[in-house]
Each structure stands twice: as C-alpha cells, then as structure tokens.
Amino acid sequence: MDSYKQPPRKDEIMIKRGFWTKPAVKIGFAFVIGIFAGFMIFSFLVAGFKEDQDAASEMKGTLYNSGSYDNMKTADVLQYEGPVAKAICNVRYSSRIVEVRVELSSAAPVKMSIDFEYNNFTLLNTQNVSVNDQSSAMAAGNFIQINNVGDNKFIFQLLNKNSLPHNIGFTIYQNDSPIFQNSVQVNKE
C-alpha cells in the first residue's frame, strides 16, 4: 500500500486584468487624448489668426466715405517742394483706418515710397484720384511705391491693426537717390 498521499491540489488564484489595464489600451488611449488636445489647441490658434484676416477682408473693396475722413484725427501733413518734385502727404487715422492722401507733381520721373510695418498695418484700398498714363502705383506687404511724372493724386487706406503708436515713412527718390525723407507717427494717444 501506498503510505504517501499527495496533498490535495489547490486551485490557483487567477487575477483577471480588465480591458483598461492592458498596456496597449493605455498607450492607445494616451495617443488619442494627445491628438484631441493638439487639435483643440490648433483650433484656438487658427481662430485667433482668422479674426485678424476677417477684419481686413470685411473692409476690402470699400472706401470710407468722405464724412469719415473729416472725423479722423490728423497725424501730420508733410510738404516738400524742390526743383524736381512737389509733394503733399496728408495722413489721418482712426482706431481702424489710416488714410494717406498724396498729391505728387514732378516734371521728371521720380519715385515715392511709403513704408510701414506689416504687423501693424495692412493695405486695404488704393484709389487713383487723378493719374496720368505715365504714373503707376504698386504695393507689397509693407510698402507702397509710386512711379510718377506729372500731377497726380492718390488715396491709400491702411487697416490699423492694433492702434498703437507707429511710424509711416515717406521717401522721394530721383535716379534712385533720396531727395526727401520723413515719417509720420499715427495713434499718438
């Protein structure tokens, strides 16, 4: 007979892991939360940039009427009269618009450059009040250039993005040499 008896076998205690405790599920969940958070942050940033663009696009193609020009504050009136050219630059501003009226006369070809900071102003409109066929105006992100011969008048409207004090520079060139240079500060208060 068998004197040795094997002890009774105990069932092993098994711990079942739940679905959320598996490492792959945790990593996947963290990845999805990260993507969602990134998307939300990106949406808020894009909305902030879009507001600036919408303000400019709402105003494009429309000129403020002459009554609004009279209600604007005068920044300065620059006058230059030399042997080659004569210029009058009248700059007025409000909390949303800066309007520059330029009267430029010259017998010989001259260039006028109006410089401003792109982060502070955006060109909305250019109006040629009286321009002959020998003159032209072109604009880029931060400047306006007028090529002139004869008597001409222009109106330029800039979007006043932040209403902080900033300078707008005016330079007249003859043969690529500056003959007049000055600046006007807007948003003085």
Image (cartoon, rainbow, N blue to C red):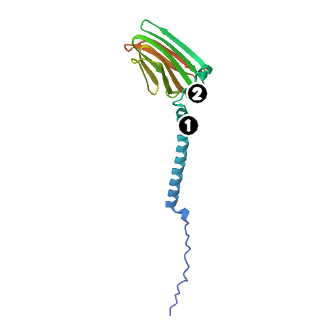
Secondary structure found at label 1: helix
Q: Nearer the viewer, residue 90 or 141?
A: 90
Quadrant of res 18: bottom right
Q: Nearer the viewer, residue 116 or 6?
A: 116
Q: Is residue 51 above or below residue 142?
A: below
Image mark for residue 185: none
Q: Amino acid at mark 1?
A: Glu
Can residue 189 be seen in the rendering of this structure? no
How far across and down, in percent of the image, does residue 3 sit? 52, 90
Image mark for residue 51: 1
Quadrant of res 110: top left
The residue located at (53%, 32%) in the rendering is 56
Quadrant of res 41: top right
Image mark for residue 96: 2
- The mark nearer the N terminus, 2 or 1, is 1
Answer whether labels 2 and 1 touch (C-beta < 8 Å). Answer: no
The alpha-carbon separation of the residues under discs 2 and 1 comes to 14 Å
The residue located at (54%, 22%) in the rendering is 99
